Image (spheres, rainbow, N blue to C red):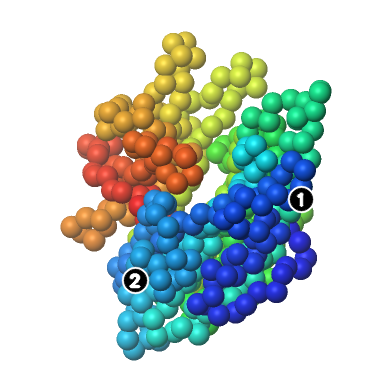
Amino acid sequence: MKRKKKSLTLQTSTALLAALLAVSLSACGTGSKSDTNVGQEISNGANTEVSDQTQTESAETDTDTTQPEDNTEDAENSAENSDTNVTNGLLGPDTQASSKVTVIFQKTLDETKADNGTVIHTNSVQMPVVSIEGAEDIAKKINEDIAAYYGTFSCQDTVSMAKEDYAASLGEDGWDFIISYSTDISAKVTRMDDAVISFEITFSDYTGGAHGNYGTVGRNYNVKTGDLIAFDELAEDDAAFHATVLDYMINLAETPAYKSKLFGPPSKNDMDSVLFTPESWIFTKSGISFLADPYVLGPFSSGTIYFRLPYEKAYDLGLKEDYCYNGNFVDERYYIDTYDPQTGEQVVDGEPDCYFDLDGDGTEEGLALYGQVVDPATGESRYAFYIDGKDYGDVINDELQTINTNGYMESTYALYHADGPDGGVPAIAVLFTEFGEGEDANGDPVRYPRSYLFGYTKEKGLYYLYSEDGFVTLPNQS
């Protein structure tokens, strides 16, 4: 999917966001429900709509956002008419009354078909629509910016390629056109409270081959003004903040968990040019994440690489109070995934890559967490979770053994202040996605993300606390 410098003219009324989305898609098809021939081989198919939603809970407690599974029932493509409207009370320091904030994800799906009914291209767009009770002008400002930004994307090149390639596949020397080409824009909320709304937006396309391509951008909005937040606004001394954060990222790239994801040690100039563009960072529940797309600093297999600056470190470096996060402390980290260059086998030696006070005694434990690993001798998988040199993988296995064949462990875990009678205890949050029965609106298996919380003391070692729906690293997705 390519960005174009100019988009079609966009309306600005929040009530017309459905029309905005249809206009932004016009480069990809008419959206008509009739099968009208467009060329010798091609006709445009029907348009269907589904609606998602996201909410947050009070910023006075923890910040949670709920995004339900796609609803395949037809829904009106506007916030006012949606039957999935969810509200949330946010009370900020400058607010005399609670403001209700709602994010609804409007989704459209367009298909381009050949004369014989074969779907040769699909275009899926999921766009967030923000509502703020008592601050409708701010919500409108945010929505206008989001809609205009979405309008800068076009799938016309991919549609044209699909038409040409499908026509060629029908020729004498043609090939099987097995999988339709596709373009997709999706979004998720990464932080939402009385100060900030942040969206991680992913755009992708598939035009044949082993896999498609995708990129990820961030959009961060000031809830009090509706303005897009610029990185140089985050600290009083923006130059010093930029320089020290860059140094932190360079050091992060030298840790084992990141070395395995990168092509090699990136230069300071590369890190600066990739991670500090206006669209390459987002606020999360963990801190500030800087985004590096596949093939930029690492191979496709590494996916989007997130360089994370925890809030505690950001505060030390000068992050303004305006952007402080008041929820439970969360530090999201990658599992160690390094391999011996001679044997190609995964290195699991228990050597810590980070330190964290897990039992609250003022002394930091050394952590070497590998997630799920494969024993090269037997070919069997197991969990490897080393704390101060001792492997507690069997504790993880005891809790996950009933589901570990019906889902997958995420590539990250979290150091987390779990809820407890003392107001929060340090914990390790293992993130696991379990498959459910049936398929979602996109035809993918239904997924249920869960967080499994484990505490630690020197006397008991690692022990299971509880589990909860969603990932603690994100506003809850359900």
Looking at the rendered structure, the kind of residue marked 2 is Thr
Residue type at tag 1: Asp
Observer-nearest of 334 and 36: 36
Give 242 or 327, whichever is nearer the viewer. 327
Query: Can you name the residue that lies furthest to the left here?
Result: 421
- Is 417 located above or below residue 369 in the figure? below
How many numbered marks are there? 2
Image coordinates for residue 228, horizontal then vertical, percent: 59, 74
Badge 1 crowding class, 10 Å Cα cut-off, few under 14, some 14 to 19, many 20 or more, is few
User: Tag 2 or tag 1, which sits nearer the N-term?
Assistant: 2
Residue lying at the far bottom of the rendered structure: 96
Q: Position of residue 388 (x, y in %)?
A: 38, 35
Q: Compared to 153, does 69 lie above or below? A: above
Question: In this picture, is 170 found above or below 161?
Answer: above
As helix, strand or loop, the secondary structure at mark 2 comes to loop
Q: Quadrant of residue 340?
A: top right
Residue in view at x 24 percent, y 61 percent: 423
Q: Position of residue 148 (x, y in %)?
A: 64, 71
| Residue 286 visible within the image | no
Q: Quick one: SS at disc 1?
A: helix
Q: Nearer the viewer, residue 36 or 53?
A: 36
Can residue 168 be seen here? The reply is: yes
Cβ–Cβ under 8 Å for marks 1 and 2: no
Viewer-side residue, 109 vs 379: 109
Task: Tell me the residue at 73%/36% (across/down).
Answer: 166
The disc placed on residue 366 is none
- Name the residue tied to disc 1: 157
Give the percent coordinates (x, y) of residue 393.
Answer: 35, 28
Q: Residue at x 56, y 19 (%)?
A: 345
| Quarter holding residue 460 | top left
Which residue is labeled 2 in the image? 87
Residue drawn at point x = 41 percent, y = 51 percent: 72
